[in-house]
Amino acid sequence: MMTNLFSIFDPSTNLMNLPMNWISTILGLLFIPYSFWLIPNRHFIMWNFISKKLHNEFKTLLKNNYFNGSTFIFISLFFFIFFNNFLGLFPYIFTSTSHLTMSLSLSMPLWLSFMLYGWIKNTNHMFIHMIPQGTPYILMPFMVIIETISNIIRPGTLAVRLTANMIAGHLLMTLLSKTGTNMSFYMIIILIFIQIMLMILESAVAIIQSYVITILSTLYYSEVN
Amino acid sequence: MFSQSSLVIIKLLWSKLSKFLTMIFRPFIQPRFNKQFLFVPNFILAHTSTCPASKPKCGASAGKGGTTSIKKIDFKRAEKSAPCRFGFIPEEWFQFFHSKTGVTGPYIFGLVFVNYLVSKEIYVLEHEYYSGLSYVVILYFISKKMAPGIGASLDKEVDAEIAEWEKGRADQMKVFETTIKDAKDAQWRAEGQKILIEAKKENVAMQLEAVYRERAMRLYQMVKGRLDYHVKKRRTENKLHQKWMIAWILENVHKSITADFQKQALNQAIKDLALAASRVK
């Protein structure tokens, strides 16, 4: 039962007041394939294919800042967020990334570590980055202010972008489905059709959002050095 | 407390229940259960045949002579996943029902169970249900339309990997075969060396023989020469002796022939001739 529009996002699965729905966060671990046998199976090959593609993308982005293994954290971030988003589409599974706690816990430490490293180790470099190339001298103070603000809100944007997208999608789906409870049979078929479209969109959004957050984190990392 | 017949019924029911539960949980617990313990639920003990705690003590096992050996682990990790219907229901559950309810049994059971849940409102058809329904339709279409294509392309990758390993193996086999062939060739050549050495030995023996014979011939000729020398010397001496003897004899005879003897000899010769002439006529 929904007390308000956003009650689907409250942690609700309970076992003697122990909230169980956050277990869906680590459910994505089950999707990682085993490499027990010498010959890989389809699952393993698919996983490797995606990992390699991502690795190449991030390596290109990082350019000179790339060391062996720089991309690992971002690839695992991608898979983590993707699995959480994707699992949230299934009925009765809680979308953990739709909570700001989760998104902020991912984006804030990343951003903070980048900023601390950048400002402490490469202070000049960070100052230089404040102003893009070719700005007129008059605009420079304003540019500094704008760039500082944009820098500061970065963890917020990263987290809120993910959370808002997930919430929006789920909200739409829930609202649509709610009308299905008091509907005639033939209307339900139209409803299901519309929901299918929405579901496809949601699956795409799940992948895209995880990719976006990862790519942006990579960009912020490459800016620092 | 319980009568004899009720005890029997309870035991029967318990065995049935335990069998049923084992059937259900066998896909999750593969190893065989210990058949000694009949009155304990088998599905609980199913794992203990490979548990270290259940190993028989040293003296208890018969026939092995009390040596502490590591118990062989019977179960193996399966290469492919167990067969299942609809992607998540194991095949064994259908087989379990088959003897009693036939082919449609499990499906009817599922249908009736779902019906019960829905009608009693244990499972409420609310917003999650409709979104789940649309998701099931999407998944069904993906699994029917796109999955074979994706599966085929992924299988190609797997086959490519297998082919790579096989190629490596086949190349190594070729290398080994070439090595074997070369080794055999070398052995054959080595045997040829033996024959060569035999021939050389014969050659040398022949040369030795030839030199020996040549030397023997030379020796013979030298010895013969010496002997010839002695023979010639003796012959020459004999000739000389003969010549001188004849000459001496003639000389002496000439000396001994006097004039009287000569006359007598001549008169005798005339008489003999006249006799011979008279005989001829």
Image (cartoon, coloured by chain):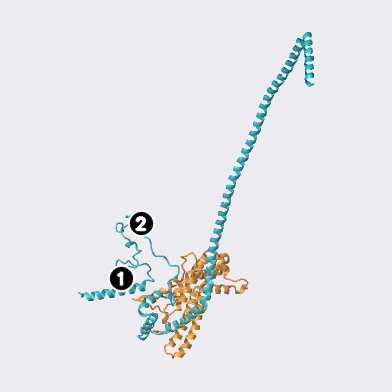
Chain colours: A orange, B cyan
Count neighbours of disc 2 (C-alpha within 10 A) and say few if under 14, some if 14 to 19, many if 20 or more: few
Q: Chain of mark 1?
A: B
Q: Nearer the viewer, residue B243 or B48?
A: B243
Q: Earlier in the sequence, mark 2 or mark 1?
A: 1
Q: Mark 2 near mark 1, Cβ–Cβ under 8 Å?
A: no
In screen coordinates, is A26 left or right of B54? right
Give the quarter of the figure containing the C terminus of chain A.
bottom right
Q: Position of residue B42 (x, y in %)?
A: 32, 70
Q: Position of residue A79 (x, y in %)?
A: 49, 71
Q: Residue at x 39, y 81 (%)?
A: B104
| Mark 2–mark 1 distance (CA, rounded to whole Å) | 29 Å
Which residue, given by chain and number where applicable, does mark 1 sit on? B41
Q: Secondary structure at mark 2?
A: loop
Q: Residue at x 37, y 71 (%)?
A: B26
Q: Residue at x 74, y 17 (%)?
A: B243
Decide: is B76 above or below B187.
below
Q: Residue at x 51, y 73 (%)?
A: B151
- Find residue A5 and report its image quarter: bottom left
- Which of the labelled discs sits on residue B200, or is there none? none
- Find residue B109 and report its image quarter: bottom left
Decide if residue A193 is in sight here: yes
Decide: is B243 above or below A50.
above
Residue kind at label 2, given as amino acid type: Ser
Q: Position of residue B211 (x, y in %)?
A: 65, 34
Q: Nearer the viewer, residue B3 or A59?
A: B3
Q: Secondary structure at mark 1?
A: loop
Which residue, given by chain and number where applicable, does mark 2 sit on? B69
Residue kind at label 1, given as amino acid type: Pro
Q: Nearer the viewer, residue B85 or B175?
A: B175
Q: Position of residue B248 (x, y in %)?
A: 74, 13
